[in-house]
Image (cartoon, rainbow, N blue to C red):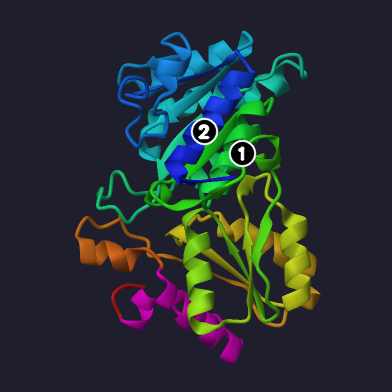
């Protein structure tokens, strides 16, 4: 066990997989000599050389497509997309090709590749570099989607993603890259894709979180001593329905906390699935805590309001537990927007 930042945990996971499997390679913009824009590949070039650690042109479509072809020919490429917004120009290679190889070949051809992308607001990168955009990839059959919430889960999910026989999208919350924590490395530290974890037990309500919102929800619960159970989803596709259902059957209430706008968020799928399967066990209508349907502001004070903070979670959860009604978000309470 060692203490490291989340970006260091990602580097450690990649290095461990590259040492064990010579078919693993990494590629992306500034990932070699510069060690990655967020230092998530620092030192890999020196250890593994330029054939396995490749700087690419600024052409996400080109190098993502190259990774799809490389995976079909027996390699295990790990592609870094600097900001998730840049994934848009590479979606054809992912959703039309990588996600469909197994299906089109009747299982004869797989696509063992990883696409890493930084996501999330809070660092002042503005509206074009601060989104999460999980819904871009979560609705494509054939893609798996994971998102870590701390250094340990970053290490464990990354190693599992590299080993997976199918394409895995790893959405890394960039505000957490500097977060430090104890990390169990080696085989013991590898996590299972598709398995959530309960990070806080409680009996009054279930909070389902993902990535950056996990730590925010924990901080909220601890600050106000909320009797809530927090389920860190970790995998968005395929998500761990059984763990969520078991928790909701115990608490009778469900709240999903997202770091994305209200419309089209992944939490809607969680609410729909749980409601259709556990309607008779619910004590109140489930609801979601999200950001407003606006671009992420650049101004520091406005960006702070955009991202759901612990105080907002405390306000909404407390009202929900007191009244049994779904609370209004801050922008409606304050008359800012509908």
What label sits on residue 185 in the rendered view?
Answer: 1
In this view, the residue farthest toward the left is 299
Which residue, given by chain and number where applicable, does mark 2 sit on? 12
Residue closest to the eye, 23 or 131: 23
- Where residue 136 appears, as percent x and y from the top left, is 49, 41
> In terms of sequence position, does the residue under pointer 1 or pointer 2 come before the other?
2
Point 60% across, 25% down: residue: 17
- On screen, residue 210 above or below 78: below
Q: Which residues are magenta?
A: 309-334
Task: Find out whether residue 223 is within the magenta segment.
Answer: no
- Can the viewer see residue 217 in this picture? yes
Point 39% across, 29% down: residue: 42
Task: Find out whether residue 317 is within the magenta segment.
Answer: yes
| Marks 1,2: beta carbons within 8 A | yes
Residue closest to the eye, 15 or 263: 15
What label sits on residue 195 in the rendered view?
Answer: none
- Where residue 120 appears, as percent x and y from the top left, is 39, 50
Magenta region, mostly helix, strand or loop? Answer: helix
Q: Quadrant of residue 146?
A: top right
- On screen, residue 65 above or below 217: above
- Mark 1 and mark 2: Cα distance apart in space: 8 Å
- Can the viewer see residue 139 in this picture? no
């Amino acid at each position: 066990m060692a203490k490291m930042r989340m970006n260091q945990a990602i580097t450690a996971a990649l290095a461990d997989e590259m040492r064990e499997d010579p078919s693993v390679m990494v590629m992306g913009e500034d990932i070699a000599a510069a060690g990655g824009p967020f230092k998530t590949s620092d030192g890999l070039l020196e250890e593994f050389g330029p054939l396995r650690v490749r700087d690419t042109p600024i052409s996400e479509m080109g190098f993502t497509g190259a990774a799809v072809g490389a995976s079909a020919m027996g390699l295990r490429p790990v592609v870094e997309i600097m900001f998730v917004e840049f994934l848009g120009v590479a979606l054809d290679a992912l959703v039309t090709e990588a996600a469909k190889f197994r299906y089109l070949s009747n299982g004869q051809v797989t696509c063992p590749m990883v696409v890493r992308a930084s996501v999330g607001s809070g660092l002042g990168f503005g509206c074009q570099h601060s989104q999460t955009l999980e819904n871009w990839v979560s609705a494509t059959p054939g893609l798996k989607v994971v998102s870590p919430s701390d250094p340990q889960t970053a290490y464990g999910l990354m190693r599992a993603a590299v080993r997976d026989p199918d394409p895995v999208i790893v959405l890394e919350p960039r505000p957490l890259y500097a977060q430090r924590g104890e990390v169990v490395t080696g085989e013991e530290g590898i996590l299972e894709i598709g398995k959530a974890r309960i990070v806080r037990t409680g009996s009054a309500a279930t909070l389902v979180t993902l990535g950056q919102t996990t730590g925010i929800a924990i901080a909220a619960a601890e600050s106000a001593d909320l009797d809530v159970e927090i389920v860190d989803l970790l995998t968005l596709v395929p998500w761990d329905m059984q763990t969520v259902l078991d928790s909701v059957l115990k608490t009778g209430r469900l709240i999903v906390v997202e770091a994305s706008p209200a419309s089209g968020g992944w939490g809607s799928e969680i609410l729909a699935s749980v409601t259709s399967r556990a309607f008779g066990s619910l004590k109140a209508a489930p609801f979601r805590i999200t950001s407003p349907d606006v671009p992420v502001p650049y101004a520091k004070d406005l960006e702070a309001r955009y991202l759901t903070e612990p105080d907002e979670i405390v306000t909404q959860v407390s009202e929900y537990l007191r009244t049994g009604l779904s609370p209004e978000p801050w922008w409606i309470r304050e008359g800012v927007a509908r």
